[in-house]
Image (spheres, rainbow, N blue to C red):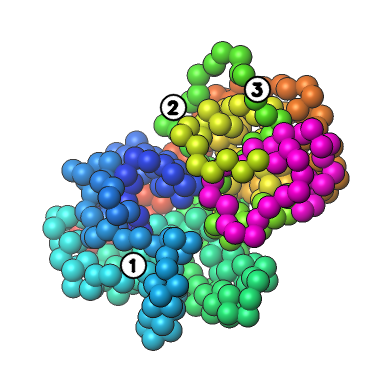
Amino acid sequence: MHLLFATSIVPDGALASGYEIANAAIIDALRRAGVRVTVIGFIWPGKAPSDPQNTIVLDAVEVRTESASPLQKLAWVGKAVLSGLTFSSVKLRVVADAQVRDAIERAGPFDGYVLNSVQFAGAFEKVLADRPFVFVAHNVEHRSAEENAAAAGSALQRWMFRREARLLKVMEERLCGAARFVFTVAEEDRAALGVASDRRSAVLPLVTRAQAPTSRAKRHIDCDAALIGTWTWQPNRIGLEWFLTKVVPHLKPDFRIRIAGIVPSGISSPHPGVSFVGRVPDAQAFVRGAAVIPLISTAGSGVQLKTIETFELGLPSVATSRSLRGIGYRPDNCVVTDDPIAFAAALQAAAAHVRDVDGSAFHRRQIKALDVAIGLGLEKLGAVRQEAAA
C-alpha cells in the first residue's frame, strides 16, 4: 500500500515541537506496517527534508504567528476573512490548487491519503478529495480555539479565536464524516469528534523516540524543577500562566525552577527561584538535570508529548489531570493533582527525595498499542482498495 501523508510541515529531522515528534511516531508506525509513505507538505525556511527520497516539498513557509510582523498578521487575517478559511489554513495558501495537484501526480500511483491534522486538509480540501483517506486529529481543534477565546486578552483576539472555533468545528465534522477511519491521540477526543465507535476511530498511543531509552548513569541534578515547551502556543501559555500564578507562590523561595523555550511578552514571575533560560541545545539533557518535572497542562486537547517523554525517561513528575489525557498508564513516581497548593507541596516532596523509574516498559507498551491501532485504520483503507480492484 502506498499512502500520501499530507501535512502542513514535512519532517526535517529536528523534532522541535510536539507536533513534529507525533508525526515522526505515526510515520514510523505506518512504515513498520509495510506501508510505503510519501510525505507532502511545506517546510520551514532554510530547512531540508530528513527523507528527501520520500518527500514532496511544495514550498518553504514561515507560519509561526509569534515571529510574524504586524503587517503579515494583518494580511493573514484579511486573507482568511475573504477566503472563508481558518487563520491556520490560510497561512498555507502560498501555492495554487493546480500546483498541489501537479505535485501529487508526481508521487505516482497511490492508494489514499493520511490527512494529518486540519491545517493542510483545510487549505487544500478540494484537491485532496480524489482518494479515500484516514484523518489524524492531533487535537479537537475547535475546542482548543474556544478555550483560547476564553483566555484571550483583547476583543480582537477573542473575535479571531471564536471565528476559528466556528470554522474548525464545521471542518472537523466534514473531515471525520468523509474519512474511512479517524485516528486521535486521546480517548476523550473520539467522542468530542463524534467518532467514538471502534468501527470509526482508534487512539494512537505515541512515543517521542524510535527506540526505548536505555538505562543511564546517575543523573546530575542542577535544579529542582524544569519546564520546556512552545509557550507561544496558546494552550501551553495558559498552563504556564496557571503554574506561575497559582502554584509557584506556594513554593519555598529557594526552590529552583528553570523554564526553557521562547516565552511571550507579559510572562514573568517574582519568585526568586524562577529562571527563564530561552532555547537550550539539548532538551533531554535539560529535563534530566531537574529533580522533578512539572506537567502543567490546563487547556487544549490531544496528548501531551512532554508527559510521554517524562514517562519514557522515568523521571519524577507532578501532573495535572489534563496532562495525562490520552495516556492509559501512569508510573508510580508521578503524582496527580489539580490543586495548586497540593501541586506545590508534591513538587517540593519529589525534589527532596528524587526517585527515577525504568521508562523502557512504558515505551514498549506504547509502541505495541500504536502498531495495533495503525493496523485498524489500514484495514479500512485496504478494504477500499480491494473494492476498487473488484
Q: How crowded is mark 3: few (under 14 residues within 10 Å), some or many (20 or more)?
A: some
The amino acid at mark 3 is Ile
Q: How far apart are marks 3 and 1 (CA)?
A: 43 Å
| Picture coordinates of residue 2, whole percent (x, y) | 24, 49
Element on which disc 3 rests: loop
Left/right of residue 289 with respect to residue 61 in the rendered view: right
Residue tagged by mark 2? Answer: 211
Q: Nearer the viewer, residue 58 or 229?
A: 229
Q: How far apart are marks 3 and 2 (CA)?
A: 25 Å
- Of the two numbered discs 2 and 1 in the rendering, the one whose residue sits closer to the viewer: 1
Q: Is residue 228 above or below residue 83?
A: above
Which quarter of the figure has residue 197? Answer: bottom right
Residue tagged by mark 3? Answer: 221
Residue interval drawn in magenta:
245-274
Which residue appears at 71% of the width and 21% of the height? 355
Is residue 34 within the magenta segment?
Answer: no
Mark 2 or mark 1, earlier in chain? 1
Mark 3 or mark 1, earlier in chain? 1
Which residue appears at 69% of the width and 37% of the height? 257
The amino acid at mark 1 is Leu
The amino acid at mark 2 is Gln
Q: Distance between the residues labelled 2 and 1?
A: 33 Å
| Picture coordinates of residue 263, whole percent (x, y) | 57, 52
Q: In this view, does 331 lie above or below 62?
A: above
Element on which disc 1 rests: loop
Left/right of residue 294 with respect to residue 204 in the rendered view: right
Q: Which of 226 and 311 is in front in this view?
A: 226
SS assignment for the magenta stretch, majority: loop
Element on which disc 2 rests: loop
